[in-house]
Image (spheres, grey):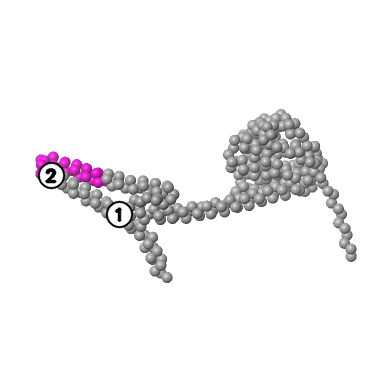
């Protein structure tokens, strides 16, 4: 049982030993040749020159010989290392002959590279699967929030679609668009921490009740913040009710203090709230809502975001569906069991 590891160790060190001996042989031949030429030149200088001049000539010849040998070895090794780099960068074992210095090293490198690539692809597939599962869970939580009341059904999905379209219109990259879409999908997740009677209330809220409902922003942030993969969504959830003039909540931020993600979600959220029927208002025409948002641009909403949404709606790039009034069903009283 102990011979197998020892044999494997010898086999794994064999390429290194062969490279070492090849380099040693080449260095030995170059130094031997350079030394022979240098010695001959020194002897010739001593025979033909005066003693003082011969001494300086010997020093110069010795230095020139050493420098010449070092230069030859440097050029030789540099050329072979460049060939090795080219072979490794190709990503495949070359069809032609490989430099004799690295004949054993290149196949070993290619095998190691393939193993690393396969492992990285496997990890990437696993991470992609986990991320898709996480997105499914986020959609499930968003649906759970919306299903608490009839008039909110589909609200989170629509806000996510509007926010993603606005982000795309603003020229953000694909990753930023996706993160903004997910933040918009979860923007009301904090409502899970609000009492049912407040979320489902159809009459106007009292000032005290409104203060409780406003806490859904910080509650949502508290839900997402411990999850590492979702921490960059927190601004869109926590700050989507902030206002450019500082009159929003929860922190009263002004202008550029509000992240772009939150400013996009804010416009998308307000647009859907006004274009869908609510217990406290009828659904408004999309063009009329855009006029309202435009009038409030610069004080309540980001003008650039409002312009992007307006262009999307008026050019037909963003379809605004007419959502029917929600239908509520009165729950029957349970029939008493017969004893």
- Rendered position, 274 above or below 116: above
Q: Is residue 104 left or right of residue 213?
A: left
| Residue 228 placement (x, y as % from top left) | 59, 49
Tell me the residue that label 2 is attached to.
44
| Disc on the earlier residue, 1 or 2 | 1
69 falls in the magenta region:
yes
Residue under the point 23% across and 45% down: 66
x then y, percent, for residue 49 = 11, 41
| Horizontal side of residue 195 vs 70, given as left or right | right
Q: Residue 193 carries which label?
A: none
Residue 152: image quadrant is top right
Q: Quick one: which residue is furthest to the bottom in this view?
A: 1
In the rendered view, does 87 fall on the left or right side of 254? Answer: left
Q: Tag on residue 22?
A: 1
Tell which of 262 and 79 is nearer to you.
79
Q: Is residue 215 visible?
A: no
Q: What SS does tag 2 mark?
A: helix
Position of residue 319 in the picture relative to residue 43 (left or right): right
Q: Is mark 1 on a helix, strand or loop?
A: helix
For the residues labelled 1 and 2, the Cα–Cα distance comes to: 33 Å
Residue furthest to the top in view is: 295
Residue range (magenta): 47-70
* 245 or 301, nearer to the observer: 301
Q: Identify the residue at image location x=63%, y=37%.
A: 167
């Amino acid at each position: 049982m102990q011979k197998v590891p020892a044999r494997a160790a010898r086999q794994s060190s064999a390429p290194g030993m062969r490279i070492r001996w090849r380099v040693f042989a080449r260095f030995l031949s170059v130094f031997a040749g350079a030394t022979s030429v240098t010695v001959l030149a020194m002897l010739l200088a001593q025979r033909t020159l005066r003693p003082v001049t011969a001494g300086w000539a010997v020093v110069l010849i010795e230095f020139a010989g050493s420098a010449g040998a070092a230069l030859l070895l440097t050029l030789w090794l540099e050329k072979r290392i460049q060939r090795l780099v080219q072979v490794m960068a190709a990503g495949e074992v070359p069809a032609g002959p490989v430099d004799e210095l690295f004949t054993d090293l290149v196949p070993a490198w290619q095998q190691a590279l393939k193993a690393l690539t396969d492992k990285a692809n496997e990890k990437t597939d696993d991470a992609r699967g986990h991320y898709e599962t996480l997105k499914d869970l986020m959609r499930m939580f968003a649906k759970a929030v919306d299903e608490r009341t009839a008039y909110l059904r589909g609200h989170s999905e629509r806000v996510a679609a509007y926010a993603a379209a606005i982000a795309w219109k603003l020229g953000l990259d694909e990753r930023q668009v996706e993160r903004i879409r997910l933040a918009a999908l979860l923007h009301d997740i904090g409502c899970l921490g609000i009492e049912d009677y407040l979320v489902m209330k159809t009459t106007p809220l009292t000032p005290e009740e409104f203060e409780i409902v406003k806490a859904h922003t910080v509650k949502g942030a508290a839900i997402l913040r411990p999850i590492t993969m979702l921490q960059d969504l927190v601004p869109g959830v926590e700050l989507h009710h902030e206002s450019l003039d500082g009159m929003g909540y929860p922190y009263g931020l002004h202008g550029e203090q509000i992240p772009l993600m939150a400013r996009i979600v804010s416009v998308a959220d307000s647009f859907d709230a006004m274009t869908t029927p609510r217990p406290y208002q009828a659904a408004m025409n999309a063009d009329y809502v855009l006029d309202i948002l435009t009038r409030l641009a610069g004080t309540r909403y980001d003008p650039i975001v409002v312009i992007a949404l307006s262009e999307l709606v008026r050019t037909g790039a963003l379809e605004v569906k007419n959502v029917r009034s929600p239908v509520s069903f009165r729950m029957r009283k349970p029939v008493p069991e017969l004893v």
